[in-house]
Image: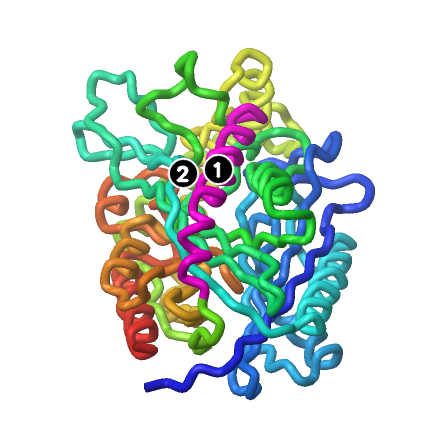
């Protein structure tokens, strides 16, 4: 039996809202931010066993992802600013808001971000104190599967459901919230881990900076529990999920899930579920929870592009390129036609998506990736994938760098020996979508030209389960 030592925890938060002008990232086109709807934050929780054997610093950021170069540079900085912390145990996850700048370290915003992430990590580490934890399960409808299936077996992301050949939604969704409440040695609530299997992208096509529904969750929970309570926001397995219910799209009783009403509604649902779950977590409060952290990297096979797929992609690219005008500024280029179509749709439609992934430009983007992968995946057949598994009492946190389709998270959670398994996507790198075999067969934007396919997904599942269950 593993010996349980006192767990030390510390919390900190930093504002990572860009200073001055910003271009929002997350679509095929840049969107100049017109104002700040809600601030972007980085929230850190530092943990250490009293004997110093186990460590972790978890940071949640209101950004689209955490790229590997950003993480590598942050680890290098922490080696100097926190020499007592082993940076291999650093975990940075993103909430996947599309209403923030790109986290590119080669930009002024990237440098500001590094400064803020270092500050929040150091502050959380320095505030470590004896802690207790309690886990709970809540329910709140936040996400829905966004892949629509048709009679011919094809699928489209945000596909039309009013077509005669519509047969249903491709995969499942998940309305459960995994929650971990944390208290200090004076029995004061200090922070909450909140795992929501839905990306925070209600406002993904708007022209303002926003933390999306997490800003509403923070506001309401601080009103309930106190301003000093911090929230570690996590996005669960949700690669095929969005906030939109395509089976009841745009009905009078449904708030606009492309704008602030939808963002507010989801935030209120999550906050209410957390408040309702608090008594259950408090009744299971553990003063000496088992704390164990495993950090590793596994080799996932890249998705193979066949000769036939390569030839098809090459023909498609050649045909579209053959129609491109010589002048790149011409309004008739694929990209400029793509932008013009967006502006037209924004002017006449209240609901998105406004960008057409099946336009010439949308098709070109994916097909050119296939051509590049045909060569690169033969030269480098494996993707070194960072994984973390952290046991905190009865709960386990298992991370991955993908937009992980729900089915993979289900497979991990159902075979895990933990009472609560927090599957956290978009951690410590960006591995793109990881679709299922059914999605590959259906095609569509989120299943085309992904670096990793179902074979790699199965390896990810098996390795994650092995690491989790080895802790029991």
Region rendered in magenta: 258-285
Disc 2 to disc 1, how far (Cα)? 8 Å
Which residue is pictured at 27% across the width and 68% down the height?
417
Would you call the spot at circle 2 few (<14 residues within 10 Å), some (14-19), or many (20 or more)?
A: some
In the image, what residue occupies the spot 68% across and 32% down? 208
- Mark 2 falls on what kind of element? loop
User: Disc 2 vs disc 1: Cβ atoms closer than 8 Å?
Assistant: yes
- Residue 221 in which image quadrant: top right
Give the camera-side residue of 15 and 25.
15
Secondary structure found at label 1: helix
> Main structural element of the magenta stretch: helix, strand or loop?
helix
Q: Name the residue under label 2.
A: 140
Is tag 2's residue or tag 1's residue first in the polypeptide sequence? Answer: 2
Is residue 337 visible from the viewing direction of this image? no
Q: Position of residue 348 (x, y in %)?
A: 55, 11
Relative placement, left or right, of 150 versus 37 is left
């Amino acid at each position: 039996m593993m010996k349980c030592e006192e767990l030390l925890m510390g919390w900190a938060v930093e504002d990572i809202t860009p200073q001055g002008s910003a271009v929002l990232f997350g679509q095929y086109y840049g969107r100049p931010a017109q104002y700040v709807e809600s601030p972007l934050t980085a929230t850190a929780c530092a943990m250490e066993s009293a004997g110093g054997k186990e460590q972790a610093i978890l940071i949640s950021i209101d950004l689209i992802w955490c790229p590997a170069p950003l993480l590598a540079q942050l680890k290098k900085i922490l080696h100097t600013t926190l020499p007592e912390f082993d940076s291999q145990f650093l975990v940075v996850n993103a909430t996947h808001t599309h209403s923030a700048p790109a986290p590119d370290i080669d930009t002024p915003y990237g440098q500001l971000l590094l400064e803020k992430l270092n500050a929040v990590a150091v502050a959380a580490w320095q505030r470590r104190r004896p802690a207790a934890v309690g886990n709970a399960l809540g329910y709140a409808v936040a996400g829905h599967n966004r892949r629509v299936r048709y009679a011919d077996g094809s699928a489209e992301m945000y596909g039309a459901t009013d077509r005669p050949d519509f047969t249903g939604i491709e995969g499942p969704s998940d309305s459960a919230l995994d929650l971990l409440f944390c208290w200090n040695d004076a029995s004061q609530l200090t922070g909450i881990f909140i795992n929501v299997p839905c990306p925070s992208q209600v406002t993904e096509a708007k022209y303002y900076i926003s933390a999306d529904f997490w800003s509403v969750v923070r506001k309401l929970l601080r009103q309930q529990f106190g301003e000093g309570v911090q929230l570690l926001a996590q996005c669960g397995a949700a690669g095929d999920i969005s906030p939109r219910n395509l089976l009841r799209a745009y009905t009078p009783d449904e708030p606009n899930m492309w704008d602030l009403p939808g963002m507010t509604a989801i935030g209120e649902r999550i906050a209410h579920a957390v408040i309702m779950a608090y008594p259950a977590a408090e009744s299971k409060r553990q003063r000496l929870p088992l704390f164990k952290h495993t950090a590793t990297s596994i080799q996932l096979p890249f998705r193979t592009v066949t000769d036939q797929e390569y030839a098809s992609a090459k023909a498609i690219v050649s045909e579209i390129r053959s129609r491109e005008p010589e002048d790149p500024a011409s309004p008739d280029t694929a990209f400029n036609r793509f932008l013009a179509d967006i502006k037209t749709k924004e002017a006449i439609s209240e609901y998105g998506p406004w960008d057409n992934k099946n336009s010439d430009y949308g098709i070109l983007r994916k097909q050119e990736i296939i051509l590049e992968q045909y060569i690169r995946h033969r030269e480098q057949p494996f993707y070194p994938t960072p994984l973390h598994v952290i046991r905190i009492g009865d709960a386990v946190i298992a991370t991955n760098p993908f937009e992980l389709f729900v089915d993979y998270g289900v497979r991990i959670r159902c075979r895990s020996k933990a009472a609560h398994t927090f599957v956290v996507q978009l951690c410590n790198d960006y591995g793109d979508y990881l679709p299922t075999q059914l999605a590959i067969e259906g095609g569509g934007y989120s299943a085309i030209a992904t670096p990793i396919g179902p074979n790699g997904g199965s390896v990810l599942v098996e390795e994650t389960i092995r690491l989790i269950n080895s802790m029991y």
